[in-house]
């Protein structure tokens, strides 16, 4: 197994880059990173959750349909759907990476939105009432009072979903996105007989990434909680 | 004296349930009105309509001359002019005592951080918490938390504070510290509407007592009259229940 890592380490890490496009583990991280926190699905999920908990009827319905739809179909269907539908819709070719990103964003936003909604609904009603009573607008109350508490409370669930998303990116190799599972497939077809070792290395990469993310989240949560309970 | 609060034929339903039944009354500037009555009588509902935490279906409510439930009014501006103190304190647990008090001056009144901080420190001093300014709510006792909540309401610099059962969630030994802050505010001329079961406070501080039952104000009288000679039979029963809890003498200890 170590000799696989030794021989193909670079291919696992960056694919055929710099000769070819960036691939391998690096591309997995880019895909997951863009798809989640920094990128798009988490902000989108916040908007969906606000719509779901808000009082504007049509927005609520729209967000509910979005959540039920993308939560109710397998990711691989969303990926295929994006692969075949997106180019038709915008009448141009879409790079595989962008297709995969779009699919992951809409799919994960549905799950993340429900986590955020649980965080919002989980706070005592009095928090919003008190915030509005001192004259804050809905947006100000959300920003200064509700979200800081809600987001802290949902860190554990968010991490689970983030971890699950990192792993879910593995599925996009089927449309030719050169991420780490794609690299593993290539290595496997070069080596032919060592599938077990190759995929064990692959698993280790995912495991380490998820472990690091979990530990970072634990550190972050502890730090915020410590600051909130700092001695007077 | 002009009216601070003017309730005109206020009606509210929860579905079929008539929670407020044609409530009409006024509170003058500087008055302290204590609202009492059995649970479910509509006291909390009534006080919560005064800053539009609850919508009403009929009638009008004026606070300081402003129609609180008028469509299209900027409710945030109106609410900023009305302090509200909750039974459960509802401090923001992620903010220190000082930051809790600073929030409205910063975000609503547009003060600078330095001004808001100074105001907060002064108000916390006033409610006897000068030594706990930077404590987090979780580090404060119930009585201390409620006093921070009062300071937070005072920071709105409003001439009116509404109290919704401010001592009901407190351990008995902490009731006094909160009531004494409220007495001080009353003495300084703050207009106050207080929903409470603290009959001692009512007797001592209130200018008028409203007795509510079944969504109506059944009695509106001076404390001396109310306690010595309640007019309405339900007020008489309520008083005897509150002042001499039935069965207290037969408890085994």
Image: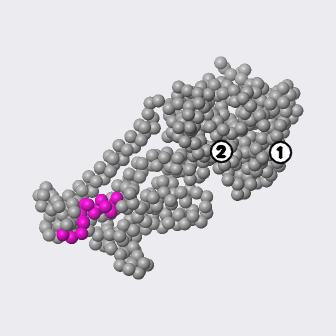
Sequence-first tag of 2 and 1: 1
Label 1 sits on a secondary structure element that is strand
The residue depicted at 17 percent of the width and 61 percent of the height is A10
Residue A26 shown in magenta: yes
User: A143 and A48: which one is in front?
Assistant: A143
**Image quadrant of residue B173?**
top right
Label ID, residue B24: 1
Say yes or no: labels 2 and 1 on the same chain.
Answer: yes
Residues A78 and B27: in front is: B27
Query: Gap between marks 2 and 1, in whole Å?
Result: 24 Å
Q: Is residue B80 above or below residue A66?
A: above
* Prevailing secondary structure class for the magenta stretch in the rendered image: helix
Q: Is residue A115 above or below residue B94?
A: below
Residue at horizontal 28 percent and vertical 54 percent from the top: A209
Which residue position is annotated with label 2?
B80
Q: Which residues are magenta?
A: A19-33
Percent x, y for residue A107?
A: 42, 64
Can you name the residue that lies furthest to the top here?
B253
Placement of the C terminus of chain B among the 4 image quadrants: top right
Circle 1 chain:
B
């Amino acid at each position: 197994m170590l000799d696989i890592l030794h021989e193909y380490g670079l291919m696992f890490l960056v694919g055929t880059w710099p000769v070819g496009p960036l691939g391998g583990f690096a591309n997995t991280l880019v895909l997951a990173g863009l798809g989640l926190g920094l990128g798009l699905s988490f902000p989108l999920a916040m908007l969906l959750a606000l719509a779901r908990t808000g009082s504007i009827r049509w927005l609520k319905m729209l967000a509910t349909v979005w959540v039920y739809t993308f939560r109710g179909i397998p990711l691989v269907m969303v990926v295929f759907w994006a692969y075949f539908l997106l180019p038709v819709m915008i009448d141009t070719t879409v790079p595989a990476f962008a297709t995969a990103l779009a699919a992951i964003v809409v799919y994960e936003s549905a799950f993340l939105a429900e986590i955020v909604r649980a965080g919002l609904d989980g706070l005592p009603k009095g928090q919003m009432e008190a915030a509005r009573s001192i004259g804050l607008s809905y947006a100000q109350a959300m920003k200064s009072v509700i979200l800081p508490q809600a987001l802290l409370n949902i860190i554990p669930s968010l991490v689970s979903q983030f971890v699950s998303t990192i792993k879910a990116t593995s599925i996009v190799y089927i449309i030719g996105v050169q991420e780490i599972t794609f690299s593993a497939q290539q290595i496997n077809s070069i080596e032919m007989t060592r599938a077990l070792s190759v995929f064990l290395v692959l698993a280790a990469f995912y495991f380490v990434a998820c472990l690091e993310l979990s530990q970072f989240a634990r550190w972050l949560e502890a730090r915020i909680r410590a600051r909130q309970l700092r001695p007077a | 004296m002009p009216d601070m609060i003017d309730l005109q034929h206020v009606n509210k339903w929860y579905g079929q349930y008539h929670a407020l039944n044609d409530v009409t009354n006024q509170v003058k500037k500087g008055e302290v009105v204590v609202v009492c009555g059995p649970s479910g009588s509509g006291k909390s509902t009534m006080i919560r309509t005064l800053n539009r935490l609850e919508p009403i279906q009929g009638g009008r409510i004026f606070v300081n001359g402003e129609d609180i439930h008028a469509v299209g009014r900027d409710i945030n501006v109106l609410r900023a002019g009305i302090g509200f103190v909750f039974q459960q304190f509802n401090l923001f647990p992620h903010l220190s005592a000082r930051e809790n008090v600073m929030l409205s001056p910063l975000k609503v009144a547009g003060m600078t951080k330095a001004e808001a901080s100074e105001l907060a420190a002064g108000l916390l001093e006033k409610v006897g918490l000068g030594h706990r300014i930077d404590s987090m709510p979780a580090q404060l006792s119930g009585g201390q938390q409620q006093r921070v909540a009062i300071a937070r309401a005072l920071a709105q610099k409003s001439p009116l504070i509404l109290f919704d059962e401010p001592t009901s969630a407190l351990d008995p030994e902490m009731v006094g510290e909160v009531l004494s802050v409220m007495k001080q505010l009353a003495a300084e001329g703050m207009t106050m509407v207080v929903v409470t079961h603290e009959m001692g406070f009512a007797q001592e501080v209130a200018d008028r007592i409203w007795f509510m039952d079944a969504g109506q104000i059944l009695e509106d009288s001076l404390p001396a009259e109310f306690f010595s000679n309640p007019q309405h039979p339900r007020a008489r029963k309520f008083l005897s229940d509150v002042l001499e809890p039935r069965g207290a003498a037969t408890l085994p200890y």
